[in-house]
Image (cartoon, rainbow, N blue to C red):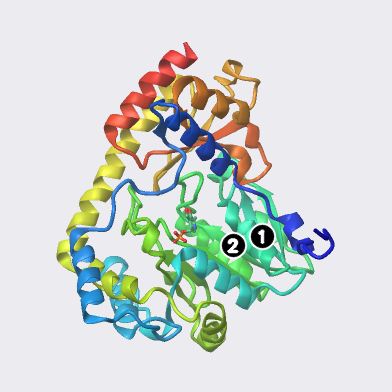
Amino acid sequence: MNPQRLATASRLAHIDAFHVMELAKQAAELERAGRHIIHMGIGEPDFTAAEPVVRAAEAAMRRGVTQYTGALGIMPLREAIAAHYKSAYGIDVPARRVIVTAGASGALLLACAVLVEIGAEVLMPDPSYPCNRHFVAAFDGRAKMIPSGPAERFQLTAEQVEANWHAHTRGVLLASPSNPTGTSILPDELARILAAVRARRGFAIVDEIYQGLSYDAPPVSALSLDDDVVTVNSFSKYFNMTGWRLGWLVVPDALVDAFEKVAQNLFICASAVAQHAALACFTPEALAIYDERKAEFRRRRDAIVPALESLGLHVPVKPDGAFYVYADCRGVNHRAAGDSDSLTQAMLHEAGVVMVPGQDFGPYTASDYIRISYATSMANIEEAMARLRKFFA
Ligand SMILES: Cc1ncc(COP(=O)(O)O)c(C=O)c1O
C-alpha cells in the first residue's frame, strides 16, 4: 500500500472524533458481556415518529412517491412548515424561503457551503454542538470558539461578538436552545447580537432545532427579529424523527437561488418518503401527541435537575429547553482521576450509566462539565440516579 496515494486532505487535521461515540462503543461491549447500561449520552428522543406520520409514510410508499423531489423540497411541505411558523409562533414566513434538507446536519452543511468564505472566521460559543466547528472546517473556514460560561448562560453575548469580530470574521453560528446546555439566548440579547452582526455586514446562522422543546417561555425565533438570518430546524427532535433525516432552513429571499444550486449538487433532494410522511406532523392529531411528549420531557427535566444537584452535580444554569443538562462535576470528580473524561469512564464501567464529558463540546472548562441527556424514560432516570448515589457514596 502506498501511503502517499491514500493520504487524507489536510482539512481533516481540524476535524475531531466524537468522545461520545467512543463511550457508546464501550457501552455496547459491556452490554454484549451482559451488563445493564442506562444511556444518558445520546441526544436522541426515546420516542419514535407519531402514528399518523408512520401511516403517512406507508401510504406514500404505496402511492409510489419515492422518486427524487425538487432540491428545495415538495411545495406542500414547505407550505406546511411556513403555516406552522404562523400558527405556533405568529411569524410570517413565505414558503418560498423554506428549504427542506437532509436533517439539520444537511441544513448546516448547506448554510456553510453558501456562506463560509475560504479562510473566513465564524464565531460560536464554547461549549457548542461538536459538529458546528467541523461544518465550518469542511468548507475551509475557521471556527472561533468563544469561552461562554454560566454568566453568559453558555451562549454568546453581543458584547463578545463585538469584541471578537476582526477583519476575517464573516459571521456567527448560534444554537438556541443549545446542545449541550439546554439554555436559550434571551430574546433581548439575541436581538443585540443580530444587530451587531448586521452592522458588520456579517451572516447569522441560528440553529433552532430544539425550538419546539422550550419549556419555560414561548420561544422567540431569530426570524421574528431579523429577516436576513438563516435559521436551521429539523424533524429530528420535537417530531422524534432522527433516522428519517429530514430538516429545513429558512433563508433570506435573496439567497434562495444560491441555496438551491448548492442543494441540487450536494444532495439532489431530501428523502421523498420522509417528506410526504412529515406532512402528517402538522395535523392536529400528531401535534397533540408531540405536545404530550414535550410535556413528558419537561417533567423529566423538573425531576432530574434537583436529583443531579442532590448528587453533587451542580447545574449552574437551569436548562429551559432541549433534553440536556450541563452539570458541573467538580464536586464529585474525586471519584475518578479529577476530570470529566475519567469521571464518565468510571460512571460507565462502575455504575453502568453513560453520560458525555465536556471535551466533546469545546476545550473551555471541558474537564469540569458533563452533559446528561434525559431523553430516556423516567424509570431509567430514577435508576440512573440511584446507581450514581451509590457510586458517589
Ligand atoms: C444543535 C444540533 N444541531 C443539529 C443537530 C443534527 O440534527 P439532525 O438529526 O437534524 O441532523 C443536532 C443533533 O443532535 C443538534 O443537537
- CA distance for labels 1 and 2: 6 Å
Q: Is residue 105 left or right of residue 127?
A: left
In the depicted structure, whether residue 392 falls above or below residue 171: above
Residue 329 visible in the shown view: no
Which class describes the residues within 10 Å of circle 2: few (<14), some (14-19), or many (20+)? many
Q: Give 47 or 227, whichever is nearer the viewer.
A: 47
Q: How many marks?
A: 2
Question: How far across and how far down the image is residue 229, in percent?
Answer: 52, 73
Q: Which mark, by number, is residue 123?
A: 1
In the depicted structure, whether residue 49 falls above or below residue 247: above
Residue visible at 35% across and 48% down?
A: 45
Q: Give 165 or 68, whichever is nearer the viewer.
A: 68
Q: Give 191 or 371, whichever is nearer the viewer.
A: 371
- Mark before the other along the chain sequence, 1 or 2: 1
Which class describes the residues within 10 Å of circle 1: few (<14), some (14-19), or many (20+)? many
Residue visible at 67% across and 65% down?
A: 138
- The residue carrying mark 2 is 173
Question: How far across and how far down the image is residue 64, in percent?
Answer: 26, 81
Residue visible at 44% across and 25% down?
A: 352
Question: How far across and how far down the image is residue 347, in percent?
Answer: 51, 24
Return the residue found at the far top: 393
> The disc labelled 2 sits on which kind of residue?
Leu
Q: Secondary structure at mark 1?
A: strand
Q: Give 235 or 308, whichever is nearer the viewer.
A: 235
> The disc labelled 1 sits on which kind of residue?
Leu
Q: Is residue 168 left or right of residue 145?
A: right
Q: Is residue 131 left or right of residue 299?
A: right
Q: Which quadrant does the N terminus fall into?
A: bottom right
Residue visible at 43% across and 25% down?
A: 309
Q: Are marks 1 and 2 in contact (CB under 8 Å)?
A: yes
